[in-house]
Image (cartoon, rainbow, N blue to C red):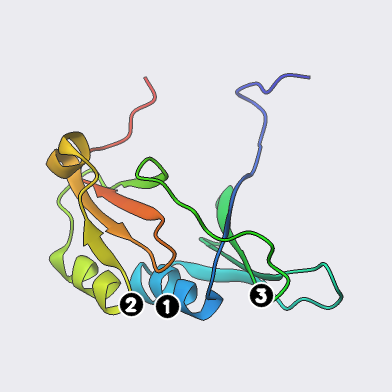
Amino acid sequence: MPLTRATAAHLRIARPSRDLAAAERFWVGGLGLDVLWRSAAAAPGEHDLLMVGRPGEHWHLELVGGEGLGVVPTPTAEDLLVLYLDGPVDDELVRELERAGGTRVSAGPYWDRWGITLADPDGYRLVLSTRGWSNG
């Protein structure tokens, strides 16, 4: 059955992480997301998990790590998570993200014009866009 406008789907973005503590400092301590779930690998072949987002929302970011992780994070310049703020980016938020392990980077002329981009400790990019989101 195809998705319809009435379908209440939940979106999960999963990414590997070299260091879940560093990722948590960035996404929770820096950006201000909440820890929705945390678990440690309990058996061989399992991973440590850190799920962050906002309670009650229909999305979350799942960070997977630990000794059993068989994948090294390999983000590209196009691996963007964009937050549409519909207004100016708070300079204090950017400073807090940098203090939490983020690195300010260029994401190209378009995104540099419309926001600020930071790489998280694993190199994945977060764009804080001054634009608003409109789906039509």
Which mark is drawn over residue 72? none
Amino acid tagged 2 = Ala
Percent coordinates x, y for residue 61 in the rendering: 55, 57
* Front position in the image: 52 or 45: 45
Number of on-image labels: 3
Distance between the alpha carbons at the discs numbered 3 and 1: 16 Å
Q: Nearer the viewer, mark 3 or mark 2?
A: 3
Q: Does label 3 or label 2 sit earlier along the sequence?
A: 3
Up/down of 132 relative to 104, above or below: above
Cβ–Cβ under 8 Å for marks 2 and 1 = yes
Up/down of 118 relative to 50, above or below: above
Going 28% across and 59% down the picture, which residue do you hit? 118
Cβ–Cβ under 8 Å for marks 3 and 1 = no
Going 17% across and 40% down the picture, which residue do you hit? 114
Up/down of 99 relative to 52, above or below: below
Q: Nearer the viewer, mark 3 or mark 1?
A: 3
Image quadrant for the C terminus?
Answer: top left
Badge 1 is on which residue? Answer: 25
Percent coordinates x, y for residue 55 in the rendering: 56, 62
Amino acid tagged 1 = Arg
Distance between the alpha carbons at the discs numbered 3 and 2: 20 Å
Q: Does label 3 or label 1 sit earlier along the sequence?
A: 1
Amino acid tagged 3 = Gly
Badge 3 is on which residue? Answer: 66
Going 48% across and 74% down the picture, which residue do you hit? 24
Distance between the alpha carbons at the discs numbered 2 and 1: 5 Å
Badge 2 is on which residue? Answer: 100
Image quadrant for the N terminus?
Answer: top right
* Front position in the image: 30 or 36: 30
Q: Secondary structure at mark 3?
A: loop
Q: Secondary structure at mark 1?
A: helix
